[in-house]
Image (cartoon, grey):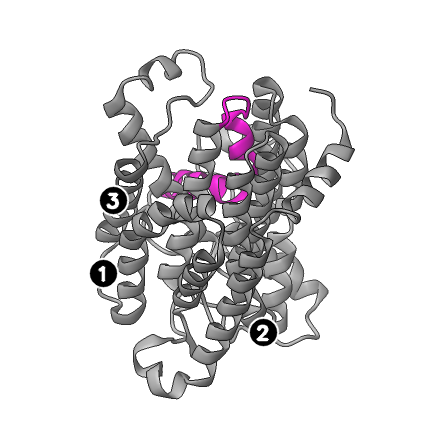
Amino acid sequence: MPLRFMDIFHAIAGVFQTPAITSAAWGFASSFALCVLLVLTKRWHGALTMDFTDGIQKFHTAPTPRVGGIPIVLGLVVAWTQAPANVQAMLTPFLIAGMPAFVFGVAEDISNRVGVMLRLLATMASGLLAWWLTDYSLHRVDIWGVDWFMQFTLVSVLFTAFAVSGVTNAINIIDGFNGLASTMSSLAFVGYAMIAWQVGDATMASVSLLLAACVWGFFWVNWPFGKLFLGDGGSYFIGFGLAWVAVLLLERNPSVSAFAALIICVHPVTEVLFSIYRRKVKKANPGQPDRLHFHSLVKRRYVARWFGQYRACTQNSITGVLIGFMTLTAIVLANLIYASTALSAVVFVGLGLGYVAIYARMVRHSWCSPLTFLLVKRRPTIDPAL
């Protein structure tokens, strides 16, 4: 497929001319208004919903409600009521299937007593429920040999549930600063919508646009002042949304490479894979929180130095959008090469190695080959101050 940048502009124009644009506006307005309402009424529900400042991964400076997922889901319900019939038909099973991940996430936000394994199973249950309701599951990953196994229903369904759970938890992992997860995910939804529009799947494009609009409504309350957080419920629901949109996009449109869908989510996918790797190297519990995530290092290595004159909340917000907007590169590339499996695979691997190279630079204070950093037989040299 020729690399024509005009295709991207046509896709953007097409997405924002879909019949669902009015319902997207309703979703944005409802999500935003409900987020503001939660902030204004926090003295009434704060005893249950506040996220306090103690914790190794926490950078915020004041207790903040962390139930931002609730207005996103309610905003999507409002958007559903205003959407065309074909969009409603696709959104209905989506809303139902996302409930296990969302409900268990919100339960953790309120009680702090829902274990990691239970939440992991809930996100997998959302993937299984989505398959049961729609009969869609991944039958290809565009890897020779693997696709043969994917033709078996059991393998396909289990792999889909695992993949959905992986992306869902990946969004939760990157949700570290004001605007980071919401910027990345709203842009990713728009990226999927643009690909869907290019291949003629207007319904898929509309659903993706609705999801982006509801997340964008939350963004303007979360950023820049951090008045409301996504919480586990919000990040799980958004993560499930990204994963299931990718599944539907691939299954409904055989011309779209599986690696193109991965490119759009390359940041959270790489983050979770690399987090597992480095914790294994350090012989740490994979579920143990730490301050060595990519976004944490960017904040302390660069943002704190470049914008040290600003208060912590401002630095957090700068870090969030700075990293969130990295997704723009992935979106552009994915929309240019979505029809080529070979090019998409090369770009996905290249972006992943680029992530590792930058990470290595931050922890070693010098550039080195990402492969050297990954394949070294001893523990990678990491600044003990981290």
Q: Amino acid at mark 3?
A: Ala
Label 3, label 2: how far apart the Cα atoms are: 36 Å
Label 2, label 1: how far apart the Cα atoms are: 29 Å
Q: Is residue 64 magenta?
A: no
Answer few, some or many: residues within 10 Å of disc 1's Cα (few below 14, many 20 plus, some between 14 and 19): some
Return the residue at label 2. Answer: 313
Quarter of image, res 310: bottom right
Label 3, label 1: how far apart the Cα atoms are: 15 Å
Q: Amino acid at mark 2?
A: Cys
Tell me which label, 3 or 2, sits earlier in the chain. Answer: 3
Residue 53 higher or lower than 356, as above or below = below
- Label 2 secondary element: helix
Q: Nearer the viewer, mark 3 or mark 1?
A: 3
Query: Residue placed at 33% from the left, 19% from the top?
Result: 150
Q: Are marks 3 and 2 in contact (CB under 8 Å)?
A: no
Return the residue at label 3. Answer: 125
Residue extending farthest to the bottom is 43
Question: Which stretch is magenta?
Answer: 253-282
Query: Residue placed at 26% from the left, 58% from the top?
Result: 104
Q: Is residue 274 magenta?
A: yes
- Looking at the rendered image, the quarter that the N terminus falls into is top right
Query: Residue placed at 22% from the left, 65% from the top?
Result: 113
Quarter of image, res 76: bottom left
Image location (x, y in percent) of residue 364: 59, 45
Image location (x, y in percent) of residue 372: 55, 29
Q: Amino acid at mark 1?
A: Val
- Label 1 secondary element: loop
Q: Are marks 2 and 1 in contact (CB under 8 Å)?
A: no
Tell me which label, 3 or 1, sits earlier in the chain. Answer: 1
Query: How would you classify the magenta stretch by its main secondary structure?
Result: helix
Q: How many marks?
A: 3
Return the residue at label 1. Answer: 114
